[in-house]
Amino acid sequence: MEWDPETYLYVGIVPGIPGAHTQGATLDELQRNLKEVLELCLEEQPLEDAPRFVGIQQIEVAG
């Protein structure tokens, strides 16, 4: 999930699931929208074909 300062919206993606991305004005709306789009994507691509999630890390780069 990221905040887009140009559109003033939260943007979310589900890595590894083609088409699983959306936006929302609040984090709650974004979560609802992600759930809906994920359900739609999984109708097209069954769960057994989905990539296996192993974790997430945040990396900071000194600038």
Image (tube, grey):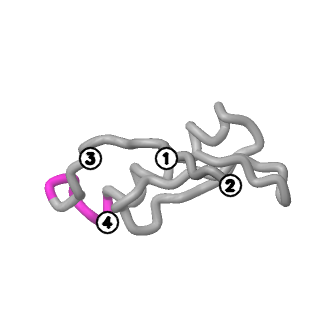
Tag 2 or tag 4, which sits nearer the N-term?
4
The residue nearer to you, when weighing 54 against 50, is 54
Q: Residue at x 48, y 43 (%)?
A: 58
- Tag 2: Cα neighbours inside 10 Å, few (<14), some, or many (≥20)? few
Which type of secondary structure does the marked residue at label 2 adopt?
A: loop
| Disc sitting over residue 53 in the figure | 3
Q: Nearer the viewer, mark 1 or mark 3?
A: 1
Query: Residue 50 vs residue 10: left or right?
Result: left
On the image, numbered disc 4 is attached to which residue? 44
Name the residue at the top extreme: 28
**Which numbered tag is attached to residue 59?**
1
Q: CA distance from mark 1 to mark 4?
A: 32 Å
Query: Sequence order check: which comes first, mark 1 or mark 4?
Result: 4
Residue 50 is a magenta residue: no
Q: Amino acid at mark 4?
A: Glu
Element at badge 3? loop
* C-alpha distance separating marks 4 and 2: 42 Å
* Quadrant position of the N terminus in the picture: top right
Marks 3 and 4 sit apart, C-alpha to C-alpha, by 19 Å
Residue 46, percent across and down? 22, 58
